[in-house]
Image (cartoon, rainbow, N blue to C red):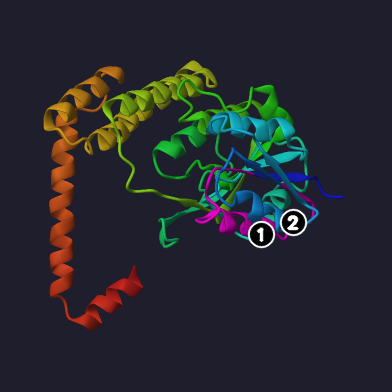
Amino acid sequence: MRPLVTIAIPTFNRAEATLRDALGSALAQTYPNLEILVADNGSTDGTAALVTSVRDPRLRYHRHPQNIGPNDNFNFCVATARGVYFLLLHDDDLLDPDMVAACLDAVGDAEDVGLIRTGTRLIDAEGRVLGEHPNEVGGVSTRDFFLGWFTGRTALYLASTLFNTRRLREIGGFRSPRNLYQDVVAEVTLAAKFGRADVREVKAAFRMHTNMLYSREKIGWWCDDSAYLLETMCGLLAPEDASILRAVAQPAFCRRMYHHASRLPSRMERMRTYREIARRFDGAYSPVRFVVDRAVGRRVAMAKRAVRSALPPWLRRQLALAT
């Protein structure tokens, strides 16, 4: 028998939306030795009816009497998983049919790898593809793996990650101060301590929700978790590598937090939040520079669209094919 893999789907009130597709993508895996665990966080819709209508011996359903919170449900899945490897699939994400098989093939069914990862596809609320991110960090050091996340060479999402279940339990499951980057904390810790394997090809889809609203308090929480994640990463590296990582990571976190803050409705609140973000990350990236770069980037994008729209249709088609 090949190693047992648990695909856990924590869910809450998504029976009429995306749960059916997420569950279907788990059931459609070509890998032969699977456990599929659906952990229902006290849903009040038709989740129970949907899941129990599936007749498949690989499927196990647990319903909490009441909502225990998302992260506690994640860790319930970790605690009760039976597989050697563990994949946490959000109830709105999707797996390619050969996702698990590609991961286990990459390690020759070895059971002692801390982390196995593939590339990730980004989709919108309707399932349209927004972009693809192949996993380009195969064979690089732990430091360069961390740097690859900040420089766009890899994307860290749960749908494209298999965790070693025993090792994930040893580090305490998914934990961070605000439970926003708890998955990334677990990924970098397992990769650094227990090794990783990388599959370049895209084998999973993460659903982006572009209408998310941020408050100043929520951005502060993201800053808390970003700072914690950075310290975790640096603590896993030699001092000289940690210094290199910090020089890249601090401005990158600034940009991400500024982007969240740019959605705040009040200009005064945005300015105050920008200043607080800069303070939290030692002024590594100026908010003035962010505002200027953003404005310039928008103008460049508008100019490109104007030029493209002025081209004859046949030339636009040729350019689209070339890109």
Marks 1 and 2, how far apart at CA: 7 Å
At x 57%, y 59%, the residue is: 21
Whether residue 128 can be seen here: yes
Q: Please, what secondary structure does the residue beneath circle 2 have?
A: loop
Whether residue 95 can be seen here: no
Q: Nearer the viewer, residue 20 or 82?
A: 20
Query: Any magenta on residue 29?
Result: yes
User: Mark 2 packing: few (<14 Cα in 10 Å), some, or many (20+)?
Assistant: many
Residue 146 location (% of width, % of height): 48, 33
Which residue type carries mark 1?
Asp
Which residue type carries mark 2?
Tyr
In the rendered structure, find residue 228 and report the number of the disc placed on it: none
Q: Which residue is mark 2?
A: 31
| Occupied quadrant, residue 87 | top right
At x 56%, y 33%, the residue is: 67
The first of marks 1 and 2 along the sequence is: 2
At x 65%, y 54%, the residue is: 49
Q: Where 303 sits versus 9, above or below?
A: below
In the image: residue 219, left or right of residue 26: left
Q: Nearer the viewer, residue 63 or 111?
A: 63
Q: Which residue is mark 1?
A: 98
Check whether the beta carbons of the residues at disc 1 and disc 2 lie within 8 A of each other: yes
Query: Any magenta on residue 3?
Result: no
In the image: residue 232, left or right of residue 4: left
Residue 39 location (% of width, % of height): 65, 41
Quadrant position of the C terminus in the picture:
bottom left
* Highlighted magenta segment, given as a residue range: 9-36
User: Mark 1 packing: few (<14 Cα in 10 Å), some, or many (20+)?
Assistant: some
Q: Where 114 sits versus 152, above or below?
A: above
Q: Please, what secondary structure does the residue beneath circle 1 have?
A: loop
Q: Where 61 sits versus 264, above or below?
A: below
